[in-house]
Amino acid sequence: MYTYKKSERLCNKKLTENLFLKGSSISLDSFRLVHIEDENQDVLLKSQIIVPKRNIVKAVDRNFIKRQIRESFRKNKHVILDSLKRSSTSLNIAIVYQESSRKPSIVIEEEIKRLFNRLLNKLWRKFWQLFYLLCSTFIRILFHLLFLLDVDLILHAHNIQKNRL
């Protein structure tokens, strides 16, 4: 559970391009999270961590920040994985660091937790909207069928009365 394996990393160029072209985005303080659902995956969650060179010039600092983000991701990804297991969907995400300086690990971990909670809220909101749409469509179809059955029964009863006369 608390690992970050190669199979969980988003390395495929096509998947990455698709993520940034068609994915949704959530911004919070010094992070931006881009996500998209993906059905054709053997792993529930694939991620990518990006620290832009234009924000953090020194490679040493970029690598240190990536290490901090990876560690906090590794510790807190179970929150997202539990939700994805229940909904049986898979997700590709990219975490982009947007600050121009290093932050303490504790601050980064708290922001990652808040970012994951926002992502879960967004995913659950989408799920409930889809559920509501399906239920309302089902109810409309049911009422339509009941109306047709009611009309059919009335016509049938009218034909029986006609035949008696």
Image (cartoon, helix red, strand yellow):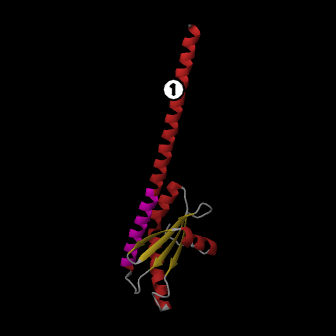
| Location of mark 1 (residue) | 150
**Which stretch did the figure color magenta?**
106-125
Percent of width and height locating residue 19: 56, 70
| Residue 57 horizontal side relative to residue 107, left or right | right
Is 135 rendered above or below residue 42? Answer: above
- Number of labels in the image equals 1
110 displayed left or right of 9: left
Residue lying at the far top of the rendered structure? 165
Residue 158's spot in the image, x, y percent? 54, 17
Q: Nearer the viewer, residue 105 or 87?
A: 87
Q: Residue at x 51, y 59 (%)?
A: 84
Location of residue 44 by image quarter: bottom right
Q: Residue at x 58, y 63 (%)?
A: 38
Rendered-image quadrant of the C terminus = top right
Instruction: Say which residue appears at 47% left-offset and 91% top-offset.
Output: 57
- Which secondary structure lies at badge 1? helix
> Is most of the magenta stretch helix, strand or loop?
helix
Q: Is residue 124 magenta?
A: yes
Q: Position of 105 compared to 89: left or right?
A: left
**Residue 101 appears at what percent x and percent y?**
40, 87
